[in-house]
Structure formats: structure tokens, C-alpha cells
Amino acid sequence: NAGVMQNPRHLVRRRGQEARLRCSPMKGHSHVYWYRQLPEEGLKFMVYLQKENIIDESGMPKERFSAEFPKEGPSILRIQQVVRGDSAAYFCASSLDQGEGYYGYTFGSGTRLTVV
Amino acid sequence: GEDVEQSLFLSVREGDSSVINCTYTDSSSTYLYWYKQEPGAGLQLLTYIFSNMDMKQDQRLTVLLNKKDKHLSLRIADTQTGDSAIYFCAESNDYKLSFGAGTTVTVRA
């Protein structure tokens, strides 16, 4: 049973380009969470999605960032017109359902975005 | 300020015990977690503790929770070179985990 799969592992973009990060949840999981880790900081919550729905995007920057989790296929985190400050590691996690407080979910290996 | 705070670095001799400390501010935290991150890898859940517990032991790992002081610690007994990593403390009371900045543990021979 494969874990949470993220690709690409490393992504380099020039300023102004678009970055698309993909996350395939664990088999059977319909809840996906994206977190961002800036250099020398802990992970920060960005967005929580269920299939075809955004449940909570309170951690997403208001501009240039969007996320989706379609009925078929992986979840996508999209960053338009990237800037140097977007350079970070982006992690995805998944869960079977929304439990009753325990969220020790497993994270994928992350996508390390570098904006040059 | 940060909701979860940890010291940034810890150096320990192989075979000794490591103790990593964490403080948090949210008194409604339901679960508290310790994650391990090795270089270039994702976060691996090491252990967690429910807020109504004060201790949890799992092989070489012991978690202590002082809810009154909002203080969490992770003790690693008989520290090995493979324990060198960044350790993150996190807390939650719903699906959003709040993480500390991580403690880099270096194990020296």
C-alpha cells in the first residue's frame, strides 16, 4: 500500500513562471492537506480539500495560489507567477476521513520548489 | 509569536539519552505529536500523546506532557547515529497541525 506520493521531488522555476505540485493520497483516502515549510521554520497549514471541494483554505496566500482535488487524479497545488519568497518545501498529507481530533497523518516526501 | 516553540539544536553522544523540549500556547490542544525529518525526506510520525495523558512510552521513546505548563518533551534512550535528524513538535485540536521550527539533533560518536 503506497504512501502519499508527491511529484516532482524538486522543481526549479524562474520568477514569473507557474509551478504545479502534485499529490496522490494514500489509497482510499479522500481528504488531502497541504503544508508549506519555509527555510528553518516548521510546517504551516495551507489548505484542506476533499474530493472536488475546498474545505478550508485559510492558510493559503490570497493571490497566485490555488488548490484542487478533482474527482479523478491527484490533488494539485498551483502557484502562478512565482516569486523568490515562494521557495520552500511543500508537503501533502492525506486521511481516510475527518476523525475526532487525531490527525497524526503521514506526510509525503514533499516537493522542494526553488525559484531563481 | 509562534504557537509552538522548540530549541533549535541538540548535540548528544552516541549511547546517551536525548531530551527534546517543546512548549505550546493553545490550551485546547487535543493531541500532541513528535515527528522526525531526515535530510531531504518527508515527516515521519514518531509518536503522539492525547492531552489527558501525562506520559507515553514506546520502546526507546518516552513522551512527557505537563499540561499545566504546556510543556512537552521527547526522550530518546540509547541515542544512535540513525537518530540524527530534525524533530518537530506539533499540536492540534482539529485537522490543522501547528508545528514548532524543529530541533536539529546531532549524534556524535
Image (cartoon, rainbow, N blue to C red):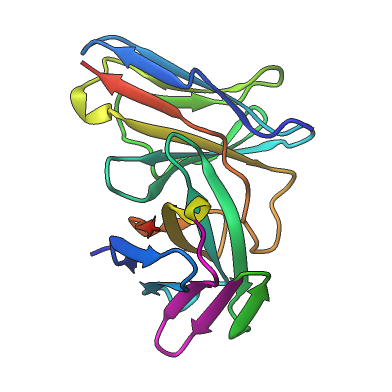
Residue A85 falls within the magenta-colored stretch: no
Which residue is located at x 59 percent, y 58 percent? Answer: B46
On the image, the x and y values in percent for residue A14 come to 24, 10
Residue B53 relative to residue B99: left or right: right
Where A41 falls versus A8 (above or below)?
below
Whether residue B3 is visible? no
Query: Is residue A98 left or right of A38 when viewed as pictured?
Result: right
Magenta residues, as a range?
Answer: B61-80
Secondary structure mainly formed by the magenta segment: strand
Q: Residue furthest front?
A: B109
Q: Residue at x 57, y 35 (%)?
A: A108
Instruction: Tell whether position B72 is magenta.
Output: yes
Q: How many marks?
A: 0
Picture quadrant of residue A37: top left
Say which residue appears at 48% left-offset and 31% top-offset: A110
Measured as percent of width and height from the top left, residue B21 is found at 39, 73
Relative to residue B81, is residue A5 depicted above or below?
above
Quarter in which the C terminus of chain B is drawn: bottom left
